[in-house]
Amino acid sequence: MKETLEVGILGATGMVGAEYVRMLASHPWFKIKYVVGKKSAGKKFKEAKAGEWVTSYEPPKEIAEMVVEEANPENQKADLFFSCLPTEAAKELEPLYAKKFPTFSDASAYRMEPDVPLLIPEINPEQWVLIKEQKKRGWEGFLTTGPNCTAIGLNMTLKPLHDEFKIKKIVVATMQAVSGAGFPGVASMSILDNVIPYIKDEEEKVYIETQKILGKVVDNRVEFANIDVAAMCHRVPTIDGHLESVYIETEKKITPEDAADVLRKFKGLPQELKLPTAPDQPIIVREEPDRPQTRLDRYAGSVPGMSVVVGRIRKGIDDHSIRYVLLSHNTIRGAAGNTILTAELFLKEGWLYDYRKA
């Protein structure tokens, strides 16, 4: 294994691109070689980022002085590429990069393709085997995707509860930050002093992606989980952090105390392997009656923004149901951080290069 892998970031000058740059700038395994963008092509990165970043983070000089390049998979060569492209651009460009290189995406374009993994590293790492089927596309590389930002936080909490109590039904109401809409996001006159009870296509993504994430891998395909999911998604005037109010019904009896214990004890493969971007505690349970709160908890965890915070765990309508609230950072755990963690897992487990032999 090379000591440091060279990586490119597709869509590097957008809001999620900002998180990729921040998290990769001092990464122990990955070194940024390309920053790729369309509108800013030809500009230095420090000039390109000025228009669309709302973070105070300043990249190191060597990245700030990089020239933003247009996408060019024929001439750009790296050990792997990260993609946070808009959907239409991802549809066009991601297969061109995956044809030659390992490509790790958090875009939505290929999430539901049967041969493309939809990965949360702690939750369903076994789905990595789907990339074996991509050889039939004639690709030398491969493509993985991360789920919708809302679905990531939700499924981080659902998986340990499902394993222990067998979930039958999920009802979730989300309160989603404006950064989830990208830059410039939602017009200020629409969102200030307001809540918008509709986000285009979001509810459909939450339920169908949840069924794939919690499904079982059989013969290099995912059998979707037979769980009823209903979602109601709202845009609220916070910048970062998605708050979700969740109700679940289970086959086995469940108590708030037992649920809290399962969530507290949960650790996944990234924690066992001590991957650089893995938080020590992927799920943090708060006991206070008024937590989690967006402003107070969105950067929770040993790797800021990578832990999901859960609170207000209460009994549901009977002994087979509970209610709780969760908070996850939508551009870190819900996007860049999740995808970087996926690439770390592929490298550590040997899947990055050895999948064709498996």
Image (cartoon, grey):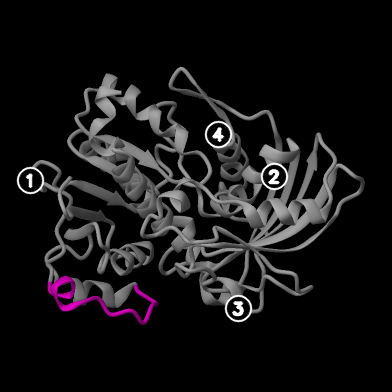
**What amino acid type should be assigned to the residue bearing mark 2?**
Leu
**In magenta segment, residue 221:** no
Q: Which mark is residue 75?
A: 1
In the image, residue 26 above or below residue 348:
below
Residue named by callout 2: 161
Measure the C-alpha gap from mark 4 to mark 1.
35 Å
Question: Which residue lies at the image location 40% right of the left edge and 55% below the top edge?
Answer: 274
**Residue sitting at x 25%, y 31%:** 354
Residue at the extreme bottom: 56
Q: Residue at x 20, y 39 (%)?
A: 101
Quarter occupied by the N terminus: top left
Q: Which residue is mark 4?
A: 212
- The kind of residue on which mark 1 rests is Asn
Could you say which disc has been placed on residue 296 in the image? 3
**Going from the N terminus, do you reach mark 1 or mark 3 first?**
1
104 left or right, relative to 284: left
Q: Are marks 2 and 3 in contact (CB under 8 Å)?
A: no
Separation (CA) of disc 4 from disc 2: 16 Å
Q: Nearer the viewer, mark 2 or mark 1?
A: 2
Q: Compared with residue 308, is residue 231 higher up or lower down, i.e. above or below? A: above
| Cα gap from disc 4 to disc 3, whole angstroms | 31 Å
Tell me where the magenta segment starts and ends, as one range.
Answer: 53-65
